[in-house]
Amino acid sequence: MLYQKERELIVKFCNLMVSRSLTKGTGGNISIRCDGGRIAISPSGVDYAAMSAADVVIVDFDGATVDGNLLPSSETQMHLGCYRKRPDIGAVVHTHSTFATVLACMRLELKPIHYLIGYAGKTVPCIDYYPFGSMELAEAAGDAMKKGNAVLLGNHGLLAAGRDIDYAFSTAEETEFVCELYYRTLLLGGGTLLDEEQMEDVARRFERYGQKQRKEDL
């Protein structure tokens, strides 16, 4: 089976997406960049609990299926749009998490109410609504992703990315957390935002954050 490791990781993180309340039912989708100009992506409309590695689909950068018997996610072009415009991205996670979707339905940009927004950037923009699966959505989301690791999709949900699947999933999870904080502070009249200097410091710290490969592994 081609790209077995990547396929197994997608099954693992799709199930985590449900268990950690980042989506409902078969909503959302996950992809991982593979070598040779291909990505592994979750199939369309398959129950995550019943999904196997063999169900994950391999597509090329034109969206054509290279390996797999099922249809790839209906949002394949949105994922590909991110990879085309951000060569440094190694994985993309799309969720329908509650508080991110609330902000997306209000067309609100997520502002720096907490330093954990640093996973995504200094802010998280919200784009207009475009039909799911459309090239318009793919183009708009890909353009917005050039400015950071997350974007709110108008009246839809959250798109997050990272250098690998662990970071992309953390971006989705922490962005949802900050969306909840922002929503709750707005109910109380608005919180105190971090300023530009503070966010510059956060950005520098996130460049060094996380486990790096040991020198002996390089």
Image (cartoon, rainbow, N blue to C red):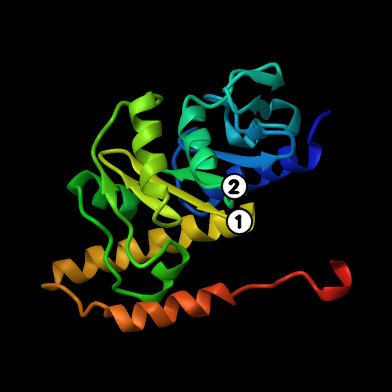
Q: Nearer the viewer, residue 181 or 116?
A: 116
Image side of residue 128 versus residue 79, left or right? left
Residue type beneath disc 2: Ala
Image quadrant in which you'd find residue 210: bottom right
For disc 2, the neighbor class at 10 Å (few under 14, some 14 to 19, many from 20) is many
Mark 2–mark 1 Cα distance, whole angstroms, equals 6 Å
Task: Tell me what residue is drawn at x 64 percent, y 26 percent.
Answer: 60
Q: Which residue is mark 2?
A: 91
**Residue positioned 71% across, 71% down in the render:** 212
Residue 3's place in the image compared with 72, above or below, is: below
| Residue 207 relative to residue 148: left or right | right
Q: Which mark is residue 120?
A: none
Please report the residue visible at 60 percent of the width from the left and 35 percent of the height from the top.
Answer: 48
Residue reaching furthest right?
Answer: 216
- Residue type, mark 1 in image: Arg
Residue 132, given in percent of the width and then of the height, sits at 36, 27
Tell me the SS state at disc 2: strand
- Residue 39 drawn at (x, y percent): 65, 34
Badges 2 and 1: C-beta atoms under 8 Å apart? yes
Q: Position of residue 183 (x, y in %)?
A: 23, 63
Q: Can you identify the residue that label 1 sits on?
A: 163
Closer to the camera, 90 or 68? Answer: 90
Q: Residue at x 64, y 42 (%)?
A: 32
Image vertical order of residue 37 relative to residue 100, above or below:
above
- Asked if residue 23 can be seen in this view, the reply is yes
Side of 106 relative to 148 (left or right): left
Closer to the camera in the image, 187 or 211: 211
The vertical placement of 206 against 179, above or below, is: below
